[in-house]
């Protein structure tokens, strides 16, 4: 049998896909109860993957078997209810099922000519997001891999526009001899924003840093005088405290100066799509570009970021693409709004999430994360843990000890318990535990059970 005949047979028989489904269901059932972080045994078993590149085509069924027996146990139980590390997310069942179906489509979302259906659903997502976030009518969306990429696009559009306003065609002339652009960011700006600043050639040392308050919010009175060469980076959701910059006031001042505002709201922008938390993002509609993830708060599968921008020309010109074979159409050609050309059909999962939840469901999902974060903080306070931040959204910062080393030991003890997973951070110069409630799966019981793991870890390390 040739390789092609073998693959043709696999495709026809479909038993491989049934096998994958069995493994997936087995995994899903186990993920709710097993250790959140893989056991030492599971980690040691990863050695099973150390082998030379095979010389010959293998057996697909045994590849899947190997992946399930040695790969599944070494994954983090992210789909269970007790993962609170970083700011990740969960996965809504409907989005996972959508991903399965669309995996069979294997669409390339670059052009309408490549995939009318994904072009259509990107369009619908764009309209719905504009409506949900109450953004200007001319706002367009680019569907990228994550917020890091979305920030990059937003800043590239800002750069294009500011230079254009100063009669400088950046695409042609580049940075050499260009008029200066000022970059203004809060001291608590996320590393992904700083990365985009560096990638785009603005230079990290050129950032005008603005002081923040004890929650990590920009202090408006600390803002420098603005002018039409400024790009201002605001934050909707501090990655540690969950705090929101005062968007309203700063956007008003920026607009008076004809400056560009980008709001990084990787997980926090969704507050603006709710009824009960939208006070946090008040004024966000006055910015020029926004970055947000589907894969965090909204619980779509990973690899789903969105750049929203109310200056379509600047965005499209900044990400400009050309090629004689590219036939742009009257309909949406997704690659015009993204740095990539070929892309998977990630917007279909986003569409499924929004179609399934509706605006009421977005409110219920996001407010639910907030409620569980508040519960976490309350229950931890009740057993004498110090909660450092105002729990305005889904993030809780805990200082379990005055001593950084002790805090680190407590973090490790919690992680090793397998009961839940939380990470550490540095907050105002002090080692802390950060909790991020990001998944729809997390219940009040998961929270209480995790609080017990905190108590036991402190007992083990501090003896009280
Ligand atoms: C996660 C995060 C990012 C980066 O987003 P990715 O999707 O991981 O690229 C940027 N900013 C904030 C505030 C974040 O929480």
Image (tube, rainbow, N blue to C red):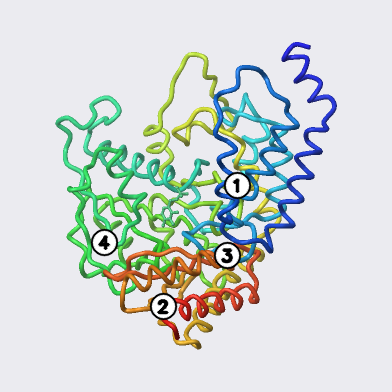
- Residue at the disc numbered 3: 418
Q: Relative to 396, say whether 262 is above or below.
A: above
Check disc 2: other Cα within 10 Å, few if <14, some if 14-19, many if 20+.
Answer: some
The numbered mark at residue 406 is: none
Few, some or many residues within 10 Å of mark 4 (<14, 14–19, 20+): some
Residue drawn 74% across the image and 57% down it:
29
Q: Secondary structure at mark 4?
A: loop
Comparing labels 2 and 3, the label whose residue is closer to the camera: 3
Of marks 4 and 2, which one's residue comes earlier in the chain? Answer: 4
Q: Position of residue 107 (x, y in %)?
A: 65, 30
- The crowding category of the residue bearing disc 3, from other C-alpha atoms within 10 Å (few below 14, some 14 to 19, many at least 20), is many
- In depth, the one of 368 and 155 nearer the eye is 368
Q: Which residue is mark 1?
A: 125
- Disc 2 or 3, which lies upstream in sequence? 2
Judged by depth in the image, the label closer to the viewer, 1 or 2, is 2
Mark toward the start of the polypeptide (1 vs 2): 1
SS state under label 3 = loop
| In this picture, residue 224 sits left or right of residue 354 | left
Left or right: 355 as drawn, with respect to 177: right
Some atom of ligand 1 lies within 8 Å of the CB belonging to the residue at label 2:
no
Spatial separation of the CA atoms under disc 3 and disc 1: 38 Å
- Percent across and percent down for residue 375 are 55, 79
Identify the residue position indicated by label 4 in the image: 187
Residue at image point 27% right, 56% down: 185
**Mark with earlier residue (1, 4):** 1
Q: Which residue is mark 2?
A: 390
Q: Closer to the N terminus: mark 3 or mark 4?
A: 4
């Amino acid at each position: 049998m040739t390789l092609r005949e073998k693959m043709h047979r696999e495709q026809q028989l479909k038993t491989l896909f049934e096998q994958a489904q069995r493994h997936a269901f087995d995994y899903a059932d186990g993920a709710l109860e097993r250790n959140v972080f893989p056991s030492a045994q599971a980690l040691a078993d990863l050695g099973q993957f150390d082998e030379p590149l095979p010389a010959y085509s293998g057996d697909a069924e045994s590849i899947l078997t190997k992946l399930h027996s040695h790969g599944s146990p070494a994954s983090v139980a992210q789909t269970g209810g007790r993962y609170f590390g970083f700011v990740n997310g969960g996965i809504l069942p409907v989005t996972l099922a959508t991903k399965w179906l669309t995996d069979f489509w294997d669409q390339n979302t670059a052009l309408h000519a490549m995939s009318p259906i994904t072009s259509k659903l990107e369009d619908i997502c764009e309209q719905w997001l504009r409506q949900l976030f109450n953004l200007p009518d001319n706002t367009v969306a680019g569907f990228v891999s994550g917020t890091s990429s979305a920030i990059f696009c937003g800043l590239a559009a800002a750069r294009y526009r500011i230079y254009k306003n100063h009669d400088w065609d950046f695409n042609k002339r580049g940075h050499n001899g260009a008029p200066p652009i000022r970059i203004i960011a809060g001291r608590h700006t996320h590393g992904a924003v700083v990365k985009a600043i560096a990638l785009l050639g603005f230079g990290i040392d050129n950032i005008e840093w603005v002081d923040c308050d004890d929650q990590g919010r920009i202090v408006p009175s600390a803002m420098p005088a603005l002018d039409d060469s400024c790009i201002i980076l605001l934050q909707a959701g501090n990655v540690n405290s969950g705090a929101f910059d005062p968007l309203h006031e700063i956007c008003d001042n920026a607009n008076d100066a004809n400056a560009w505002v980008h709001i990084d709201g990787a997980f926090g922008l969704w507050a603006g799509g709710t009824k009960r938390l939208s006070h946090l993002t008040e004024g966000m509609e006055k910015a020029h570009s926004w970055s947000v993830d589907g894969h965090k708060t909204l619980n779509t599968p990973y690899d789903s970021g969105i750049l929203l921008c109310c200056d379509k020309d600047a965005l499209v010109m900044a990400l400009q693409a050309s090629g004689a074979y590219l036939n742009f159409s009257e309909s949406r050609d997704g690659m015009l709004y993204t740095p990539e050309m070929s892309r998977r059909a990630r917007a279909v999962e986003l569409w499924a999430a929004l179609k399934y939840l509706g605006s009421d469901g977005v409110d219920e999902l996001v407010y639910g994360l907030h409620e569980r974060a508040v519960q976490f903080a309350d229950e931890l306070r009740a057993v004498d843990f110090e909660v450092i931040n105002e729990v305005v959204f889904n993030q809780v910062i805990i200082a379990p000890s005055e001593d950084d080393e002790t805090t680190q030991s407590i973090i490790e003890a919690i992680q090793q318990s397998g009961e839940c997973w939380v990470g550490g951070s540095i907050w105002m110069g002090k080692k802390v535990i950060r909790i991020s409630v990001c998944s729809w799966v997390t219940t009040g019981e998961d929270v209480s059970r995790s609080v017990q793991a905190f108590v036991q870890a402190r007992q083990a390390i501090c003896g009280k």
